[in-house]
Image (spheres, rainbow, N blue to C red):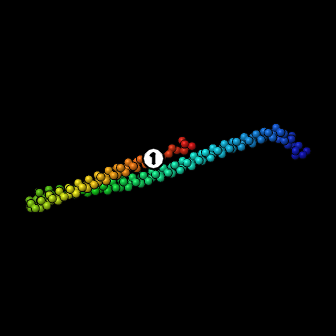
């Protein structure tokens, strides 16, 4: 008995078996093609998600850094306002002390009063300048918020891929 006889007896050498094997191979190739296509589609989707996420994260990180700078600037404005208020309080206290001091001369009292007026004027200028600066900061914050809205966090890949 030869090798061909064994194949014929098992049915693998018949034309019907050859057709079945050919059909199975075609089905296998089609299935592999679909799996490869699906894998490529998911890979492309994940790549697009990663790119979008990186771009949006970068924009949002830049916005956060600018927010921190604005917070620092606003903190300095608040400190400046506190110093001006403290200067007002000190000048007023000095004037009240000079008014209550019976040994203080009229010129000393006038000097303290003029000093109080000068400090009040300087404080008013500081408050006005700081208010203008706060308005600029508010406008910058609105611009930053618009950039945040333009760069939302993308939905997770489970929802898009």
Q: Residue furthest top?
A: 16
Say what secondary structure mark 1 lies in: helix
Front residue (pair 140, 46) = 140
Q: Where does residue 139 sit, x and y in percent of width and height?
A: 35, 49
Circle 1: is it few (<14), some (14-19), or many (20+) Cα within 10 Å?
Answer: few
| Image quadrant occupied by the N terminus | top right
Q: Quadrant of residue 77?
A: bottom left
Q: Is residue 101 above or below residue 51?
A: below
**Residue 126 in picture, x, y percent from top left:** 26, 56
Specify whether 61 is left or right of 18: left
Q: Residue at x 57, y 43 (%)?
A: 161
Position of 93 with respect to 74 (left or right) is left
Instruction: Count how many numbered circles sit on residues in the image.
Output: 1
The residue sitting at 41% across, 54% down in the picture is 65
Tell me: residue 104, above or below residue 143. below
Q: Is residue 82 visible?
A: no
Residue 51 visible in this rendered orientation of the protein: yes
x, y (%) of residue 156? Answer: 52, 44
Q: Name the residue beneath numbered marker 1.
A: 150
Horizontally, residue 8 falls left or right of residue 102, namely right
Residue drawn at 20 percent across, 55 percent down: 120
Left/right of residue 63 with respect to residue 124 in the rendered view:
right
Instruction: Say which residue appears at 86% left-offset and 40% top-offset.
Output: 9
| Position in image of residue 75 (x %, y %) | 33, 55
């Amino acid at each position: 008995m030869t090798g061909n006889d064994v194949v014929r007896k098992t049915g693998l050498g018949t034309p019907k078996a050859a057709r079945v094997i050919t059909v199975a191979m075609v089905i296998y190739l089609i299935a592999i093609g679909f799996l490869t296509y699906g894998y490529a589609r998911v890979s492309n989707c994940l790549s697009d998600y990663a790119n979008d996420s990186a771009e949006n994260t970068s924009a949002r990180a830049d916005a956060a850094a600018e927010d921190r700078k604005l917070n620092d600037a606003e903190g300095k404005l608040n400190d400046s306002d506190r110093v001006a208020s403290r200067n007002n309080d000190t000048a007023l206290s000095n004037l009240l002390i000079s008014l209550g001091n019976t040994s203080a001369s009229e010129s000393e009292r006038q000097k303290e009063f003029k000093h109080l007026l000068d400090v009040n004027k300087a404080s008013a200028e500081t408050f006005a300048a700081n208010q203008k600066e706060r308005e600029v900061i508010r406008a910058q914050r609105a611009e930053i918020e618009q950039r945040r809205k333009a760069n939302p966090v993308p939905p997770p890949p489970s929802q898009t891929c």
